[in-house]
Image (cartoon, coloured by chain):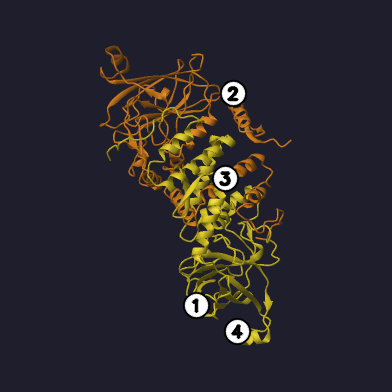
Chain colours: A orange, B yellow
Amino acid sequence: MEPTKVNVPPMKDLTIDNITENTVLINSQSGDQRLAYLMERLVTHLHDFARETRLSTKEWMAALNFLVRVGQVSSDVRHEFILLSDILGLSLLVDAIDHPKPPSSTEGSVLGPFHTHDPPTIPSGSSMSSDPSGEPCLVICTITDVHHTPISNVKIDIWETDSTGHYDVQYKDMERPDGRCVMRSDERGVFWFKAIVPVPYPIPHDGPVGELLEMLGRHCWRPAHMHFMFEKEGWDHLITALYIRNDPYETSDAVFGVKQSLIVDFMKATKEEAEKYGVKEGTKVLKHHFVLVGARETEELRDRNALEAMGKLGRKVKLIDHLPVPDVD
Amino acid sequence: MEPTKVNVPPMKDLTIDNITENTVLINSQSGDQRLAYLMERLVTHLHDFARETRLSTKEWMAALNFLVRVGQVSSDVRHEFILLSDILGLSLLVDAIDHPKPPSSTEGSVLGPFHTHDPPTIPSGSSMSSDPSGEPCLVICTITDVHHTPISNVKIDIWETDSTGHYDVQYKDMERPDGRCVMRSDERGVFWFKAIVPVPYPIPHDGPVGELLEMLGRHCWRPAHMHFMFEKEGWDHLITALYIRNDPYETSDAVFGVKQSLIVDFMKATKEEAEKYGVKEGTKVLKHHFVLVGARETEELRDRNALEAMGKLGRKVKLIDHLPVPDVD
């Protein structure tokens, strides 16, 4: 490889005070305004963090070694950096920024590291868990828009742990997906299925993220919940979860996923429901109504929120592809 | 594992506006004031970064996947996170904070990802490179304190690439360390050795850091240099490098390591020198005088700088183990 042409600002004698400006400058050559803005903010915050903490070489090295381990424990079925983002509150924040919800729509929650792309598609009425030790439950849902109009043919991903608090992919000898499925809503916006009552469980804590939680004196538990993801062309992608009321971790979720509007109650199946849905009378039943928002409406809300928030921060920006970059005109 | 006792602030309904405060709160339970301060600044900067850029889910996911790859390409002989820190200017900044230099002492430079712990210890006069294609050179150094008093028995790590710009550990079939050694200064503070004239080289750019540089329109070259590390009880650990004057990358080092005071010139060995040191007349000779600073003096300077810098930032801090934490009294 031949040396390439040098066309960057002179950078000798960089110091605590001028390193940030010069790093930002050399990172601004690509012509991609969004990338340049992301790098400018990233480098500024990273350097300010080091300056404000007077970060020591020992701490810096410990942090870099920690990050190597976060990468190395990750695999196709375990994304430790998502987990790290989750326990630092970043995942919840990014979702809140990217998927703003108008009043009366269903709020979002964290994706978590255990969503997979290969679950079986099952028809309404099927069971998505084969765990015989789980407490059976029936889940009956509807999907509408904010005006109560049913939305049909939505692709719904649903996933939960087994009765011991483990996802299928956490078992080394897993043969097929379990505790997860894909469904489609019918013309009335309905989908229903049999599952097991969710249980609280610790997030994977045998890796570096678990060690960090321990150092911080934090527990690693999530309250009992069931994940849902909704996709349909023209509608804003919704990642959310339903949380079972009165869980001991309801107010201390290790990954900050709980919202008041997502806390739900189980009923008991009446005789009529038991017959209609093919379950035993008294089986726990969860009924929930999800409200999706149009993709266009979400986009407009996101743009409006972005400009308003940046205005409050005193930043003069314009939106390119709906994402802010400095407005230097 | 049994659920542990919950003793944290209530955390339902976290939003763009309250997530930071609550994450900081839950991270402050360990009783370790320094850890709590580091986490407070880290989470605040991370969240502010997301808020100021209105970071999208797609960008967030791309960043997390990038970080996984940075971890996974790392190994015992390649630390891609150090490399990432290097190209973002963080390494230089942390070194400048942690190892402040009084006037007339030798300045620091970046460690880089290729220092190893197993090089052979060689006596003065030995050769530390066996590359027959390299241009031979002679390096004659002295080590003193700021008052010109020689410092004996300093452990000096020295490492450089071969003539193709690769470190020994970059070869899969490497049999033994080459282009690196450990030496000790004699009672006059002198150490000298034979080596090859350093060449400019690209940092490893076949991994995610190389891709990032490419996206940013940055080149991946470092100007020709030779690394030095100095260790002796009672003296501040010095990591530095000497840069060969007029290198095409002198003003655009990909990892921001160059300082004016570290740029050096080669002379040619006189007849007398050639005889004295056992080299051919006219061989390139590099003579350099390193100046170490006492550990205590550096510590005092670091403390003074920290308090002064934090005062300028308007932060009320105290030092614990020489590192700042908020002074809440």
Asked if A132 appears above or below B292 in the picture, the reply is above
Q: Which amino acid type is marked by label 1? A: Ile
Give the camera-side residue of A117 and B14. B14
Chain ID of residue with mark 2? A
The answer for which chain carries disc 4 is B
Q: CA distance from mark 1 to mark 3?
A: 48 Å
Query: Residue beneath label 1, please?
Result: B122
Q: Secondary structure at mark 4?
A: helix
Residues marked 2 and 3, same chain:
no
Tag on residue A244? none
Locate the C terminus of chain B and report the quarter of the image it occupies. top left
Q: Chain of mark 1?
A: B
Q: Residue at x 67, y 56 (%)?
A: A11
**Tag 4 residue:** B277
**Which residue bears the numbered disc 3?**
B313
Q: Which residue is mark 2?
A: A296
Mark 1 secondary-structure assignment? loop
For mark 2, give the secondary structure: helix
How packed mark 4 is, by other alpha carbons closer than 10 Å (few <14, some 14-19, many 20 or more), is some
Can residue B207 be seen in the rendering of this structure?
A: no
Residue in the foreground of this view, choosing between B84 and B173: B84
Mark 2 and mark 3 in contact? Answer it, CB < 8 Å.
no
> Residue A107, how many percent across, how many down?
47, 25
Around disc 1, counting alpha carbons within 10 Å, would you say few (fewer than 14), some (14 to 19), or many (20 or more)?
some
Say which element carries label 3.
loop
Three-letter residue code for mark 4: Tyr
Residue B308 seen anywhere in this rendered image of the structure: yes
Q: Is residue A272 left or right of residue B79?
A: left
What is the spatial separation of the Cα atoms under label 4 and label 1, in whole angstroms?
A: 16 Å
